[in-house]
Image (spheres, rainbow, N blue to C red):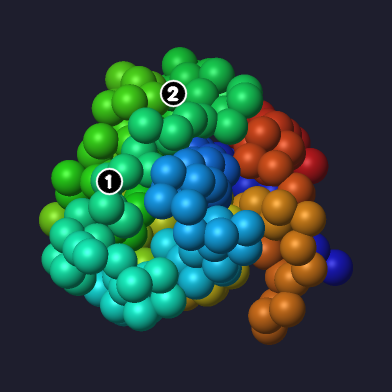
Amino acid sequence: MREPFIPVRTLLVDLDNTVVDRAGAFTAWATAFADERALGADAAAWLVDADSDGYTPRALLAERMRARFALSEDVPQLVEVLLFEHLPWIAPYPGVLARLDAWRSAGVPVVVVTNGTVVQQQDKIDRTGLAGLVSGVVISEAAGVNKPDPGIFATALDVAGVADAAGAWMVGDDPRADVLGGRDAGLRTGWVSHARTWNEDGAPDVTHATTVEVLDALLPARAGGR
């Protein structure tokens, strides 16, 4: 039997594919990149698959791109392309920013916790206006530690101005980085499944297909209800 909800006192949220549609932005960039260079009908799909939602190291993906498409750019140049050229397509999922603003307005600290470089991730935050809707942002490069390490969640709680994980939730799409990492740090967890099946040990406290659905499901917890 699932434990009853406790009031949500602190909300930590992932950025890519939780607040913003990173997958959609990368797919749009890959399509444009492949079309502009006439790389072939399957090139965009190959780029999306090889990217692995951003988890393939950028230098490794750049090497694979050079080999597959005989590109003239060297690896450092392609790394820059991969880091930044999809950013114009970055947009928040519909309804998510309004939900985060509602939590903040209700007095619940909201902190973004994201892996990545400061320049890239801060650009996404600036483009979407997210900075004005949250209490703070923790980016792994600046924090010196990546999700799922408990240290980055401890840093986020410090940024939120709370002493411990009591009443704190982590909401994200990655099973290991967000859910298992959050759980190991003593947080309750909400998983944005994007219609995937949970294949890890144990289940998140809340699971829904979209971020809006997860955040809405936490509203009874904010009120202290069941």
Looking at the image, residue 72 sits to the left or right of residue 190; the answer is: left
Q: Which amino acid, by three-letter code, is at mark 2?
A: Arg
Q: Tell me which residue sits at (75%, 48%) in the image.
A: 209
Residue position for label 1: 84
Q: Quadrant of residue 173?
A: bottom right
**Where 60 sits versus 10, above or below?**
below
Where does the image place residue 175, in percent across and percent down from the top left? 59, 69
Q: Tell me which residue sits at (31%, 43%) in the image.
A: 85
* Direction right: furthest residue: 1
Q: Tell me which residue sits at (55%, 19%) in the image.
A: 98
For mark 2, does the 10 Å Cα neighbourhood hold few (<14), some (14 to 19), or many (20 or more) residues? Answer: some
Residue 44 in sight in this render: yes
Mark 2 or 1, nearer chain start: 1
Residue at disc 1, secondary structure: helix
Residue 169 or residue 196, whichever sits in front: 196
Which label lies toward us, 2 or 1?
A: 1
Q: Tell me which residue sits at (44%, 33%) in the image.
A: 89
Where does the image place residue 154, in percent across and percent down from the top left? 29, 60
Where does the image place residue 193, in percent across and percent down from the top left? 70, 56
Looking at the image, residue 74 sits to the left or right of residue 42; the answer is: left
Q: How many marks?
A: 2
Residue position for label 2: 104
Residue 76 or residue 168, whichever sits in front: 76
* Direction bottom: furthest residue: 201
Looking at the image, residue 147 sits to the left or right of residue 9; the answer is: left
**Where 30 sits versus 176, above or below?**
above
Residue 181 in sight in this render: no
